[in-house]
Amino acid sequence: MSAKGGVAGQYRETREVIFSPAGERTERAVGKPYEHFDRLRMTPEDFRDLREIQPLMLTLERLKFYTTRYRGEETINGVACWVLDVQPRQLLDGQRLFEGLIWIAQEDFSVVQSEGRAVPQIMSTKEENLFVRFRTIRKRVKEGYWFPVLTVADDTLPFRTGPLRLRMRVEYLGYQKFGSETVIKFEEN
């Protein structure tokens, strides 16, 4: 987020996200977003982080971008977990990655919770684009899969114009399984 003068504000948006059977993601806005900021500007990196980093869809394809280190064991909401420190292997220009901790369920290796921030922070002599520390909580939904249900943040970002406290709440609702079966029959003439 980039800081401007004045008082902070609010942003609200509802989106539908659909994954095809092949794993392809599509999304669309439901209604019009509400944005009222006096002191902040949502950047393309903020929107990308909301969709990719904060829900932490850590797939096998993305795992190669990270190093992990075992930090111990904890129980989260009755689920025995391993705690891993996750760091980007390398940050390339334009890349957005996660840096922080993840809690992995010992029973099925699912991500139960993540806490950290999107990196890198973007700071130059002309621009500063800083990102909050957040926590994403997952719950079992539909057929035992773990999905994000809530991302929260309450962080103070050290902008050059002065520190700015930001609170964020993202709710993930209405998970549904979509499926179809298609049969194509050829008849001889």
Image: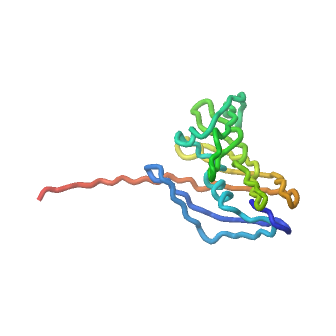
* Residue at (71% x, 40% y) in the render: 100
Compare residues 102 and 5 and report the one nearer the observer.
Answer: 5
* Residue at (55% x, 41% y) in the render: 144
Q: Residue furthest left?
A: 189
Position of residue 132 measured from the top left corner of the image (x, y, whole percent): 76, 52
Position of residue 157 measured from the top left corner of the image (x, y, whole percent): 82, 54
Compare residues 132 and 185 and report the one nearer the observer.
Answer: 132
**Can residue 47 be seen from the camera position used here?**
yes
Q: In the visual, does 129 lie left or right of 50?
A: right
Q: In the visual, does 147 lie left or right of 122?
A: left
Compare residues 51 and 99 and report the one nearer the observer.
Answer: 99
- Quarter of the image with the C terminus in it: bottom left
- Quarter of the image with the N terminus in it: bottom right
* Residue at (71% x, 63% y) in the render: 42
Q: Is residue 158 above or below residue 30?
A: above
Residue 73, by quadrant, is: top right
Q: Is residue 185 above or below residue 110?
A: below
Position of residue 96 measured from the top left corner of the image (x, y, whole percent): 64, 50
